[in-house]
């Protein structure tokens, strides 16, 4: 495989641009803002569930309170009726009087119990309401954070996309200077190793960082300038420069 020394040097530019594109791609997928946003969104989802639960509880407690209040009213009305009979002097028989009095006492106990139920329901409603208030306050706070993080993430993505577009344009221009078969080999090696070409610097391959054997160096010295060489260790295209130490 042949390529002019100039075209071979372009491979090193290509490798730099590809490294840059890989770095940008990694940054795009590991934005801290995106991770934070996910956390906030997960919490927001919990909060929404919490509010739904609190609303259900508040509804249940309101019904419980209304029912107990209605029962209190019924018991109170019954007591009033019994008292009216008692005070009206319609009941004369001692047995009936005593029955009526004990019924009033029992109704009063019942009323007191029901009033307890009403009070308890009210207290539980208050507690549920303040829980709900705390949840919605957190929702409001996190909602702002969510917006801020989404804006930051979008700005970061826009910046990355801009840099990637620039690198991509540069890559196309550089790739146009490389013979098609060499470019195809470079791309295949890039798929396999992440980097397709490396510089030979002071007798060392910059791809695998191994120093070449004298035998290999001699082989490289003997090669024509337009021969496309490969590192014996990592198989990347090895590009000779003035710093190669040949
Ligand atoms: Zn190597």
Image (spheres, helix red, strand yellow):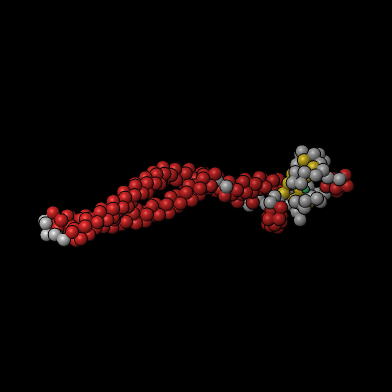
| Residue 112: x %, y % from top left | 28, 51
Quadrant hosting residue 138: top left
Tell me where residue 88 appears, x and y as whole percent.
11, 56
Q: Nearer the viewer, residue 9 or 38?
A: 38
**Residue 239 seen by the camera:** no
Q: Residue furthest front?
A: 94
Direction right: furthest residue: 215
State the count of labels: 0
* Residue at figure coordinates x 69%, y 46% from the top left: 12
Q: Residue at x 51, y 45 (%)?
A: 36
Q: Position of residue 246 (x, y in %)?
A: 82, 41
Residue at x 77%, y 53% (from the top left corner)? 235
Quadrant placement of the N terminus = bottom right
Nearer-the-camera pick, 204 or 48: 48
Residue 32 visible? The answer is: yes
Q: Residue at x 70, y 50 (%)?
A: 195
Q: Where does residue 233 sit, x and y in percent of width and height?
A: 80, 50
In front of the other: 74 or 101: 101
Left or right side of 101 for 221? right
Horizontal arrangement in the rendering, residue 216 relative to residue 75 (left or right): right
55 on left or right of 27: left
């Amino acid at each position: 495989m042949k390529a002019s020394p100039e075209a071979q040097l372009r491979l090193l530019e290509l490798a730099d641009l590809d490294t840059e594109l890989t770095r940008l791609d990694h940054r795009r997928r590991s934005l801290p803002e995106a991770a934070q946003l996910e956390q906030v969104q997960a919490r927001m989802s919990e909060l929404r569930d919490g509010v739904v639960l609190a609303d259900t509880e508040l509804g249940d407690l309101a019904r419980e309170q209304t029912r107990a209040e209605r029962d209190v009213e019924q018991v109170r009305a019954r007591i009033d009726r019994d008292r009216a009979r008692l005070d009206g002097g319609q009941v004369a028989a001692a047995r009936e009087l005593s029955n009526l009095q004990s019924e009033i006492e029992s109704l009063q106990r019942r009323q007191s119990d029901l009033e307890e139920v009403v009070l308890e329901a009210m207290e539980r409603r208050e507690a549920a309401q303040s829980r709900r208030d705390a949840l919605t306050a957190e929702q409001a706070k996190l909602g702002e954070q969510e917006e801020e993080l989404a804006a930051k993430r979008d700005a970061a993505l826009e910046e990355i996309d801009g840099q990637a577009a620039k690198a991509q344009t540069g890559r196309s221009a550089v790739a146009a200077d490389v013979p098609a078969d060499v470019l195809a080999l470079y791309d295949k090696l890039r798929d396999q190793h992440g980097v397709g070409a490396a510089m030979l610097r002071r007798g060392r391959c910059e791809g695998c960082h191994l120093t070449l054997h004298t035998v290999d160096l001699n082989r490289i010295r003997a090669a024509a300038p337009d021969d496309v060489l490969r590192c014996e260790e990592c198989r990347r295209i090895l590009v000779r420069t003035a710093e190669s130490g040949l």
